[in-house]
Image: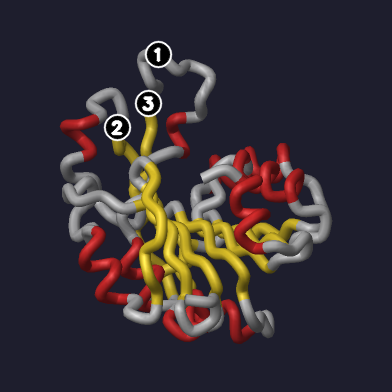
Amino acid sequence: MNKQKIKKLLQKDNPVVLEVGAAGGGDSLEFLKEFSQVQLYCFEPDPRAIALHKSRVQDSRCQLYEIAMSDTNGQAEFYQSSGQHPKYTSIHDWSASSSLKAPKEHLKLYPWCTFDTNIKVPTYKLDTWAEEHQIGEVDFIWADVQGAEEELIKGGLKTLSRTRYFYTEYYNKEIYQGQPNIERIKSLIPAFKDIEYYKGNVLFKNLDLVDR
């Protein structure tokens, strides 16, 4: 989903946007380009991606938090992906598939991508973070958490209740161990309606906040 379409959807130039799984900052830069007054809060636990994000995104409208969003406050095992796509050598593939969840079908679908290193990363509930930072209504959540969608949602139900739109990856195969399929995701957020599907992503709107 391109950021121009998000701007038309939100109909404002000063949205509050949460980017959960910010990787190397590519999407962050697009949000900053499209919305001149955006309040962009980014979350990324992979030290390699954090370093890349900091080198590319230097803008006061964007704040980067070096944490993983989950359903517990503490620490968790983080599976770092590595390897290089055989065709797209310019892409930082090492940052594209790291997850709080152990890989499963991912190992068969993308054999070039390996998971050789596990590290410990700090985890936060989205609700805990939002309360600590006095975040009110959220216009848009862009989630790219590689299989940890259920943990993100369970740890952020209060924040999601104040969120207009929620955009997340989904798979109906178990790419990562314990990854929820689209029906499971929908069951976790009954106040939201799925309104548009993209390749491997879905856009939800909050029926309590957005006109039906």
Residue at image x 38%, y 70%?
193
Q: Amino acid at mark 2?
A: Thr
What's the mark number on residue 115?
Answer: none
Q: Is residue 153 visible?
A: yes
* Image-quadrant location for residue 17: bottom right
Q: Secondary structure at mark 1?
A: loop
Pointer 2 and pointer 3: residues touching (CB < 8 Å)? yes
The residue mark sitting in front, 1 or 3, is 1
Residue at image x 69%, y 60%?
40
As drawn, the residue found furthest toward the front would be: 212
The foreground one among 76 and 26 is 26
Q: Position of residue 140 (x, y in %)?
A: 58, 65
As drawn, the residue found furthest toward the top would be: 87
Q: Is residue 190 above or below residue 193?
A: below
Residue at image x 33%, y 60%?
148
Q: Position of residue 72 (x, y in %)?
A: 39, 77
Alpha carbon separation for disc pair 1 and 2: 16 Å
The foreground one among 159 and 122 is 159
Q: Amino acid at mark 3?
A: Gly
- Which residue is denoted by mark 3 in the rendering? 83
What's the mark number on residue 87?
Answer: 1
Residue at image x 74%, y 63%?
12
Among numbered discs 2 and 3, the one appearing first in the sequence: 3
Check disc 2: other Cα within 10 Å, few if <14, some if 14-19, many if 20+: some
- Which residue is denoted by mark 2 in the rendering? 114
Q: Is residue 22 above or below residue 111?
A: below
Q: Position of residue 182 (x, y in %)?
A: 25, 60
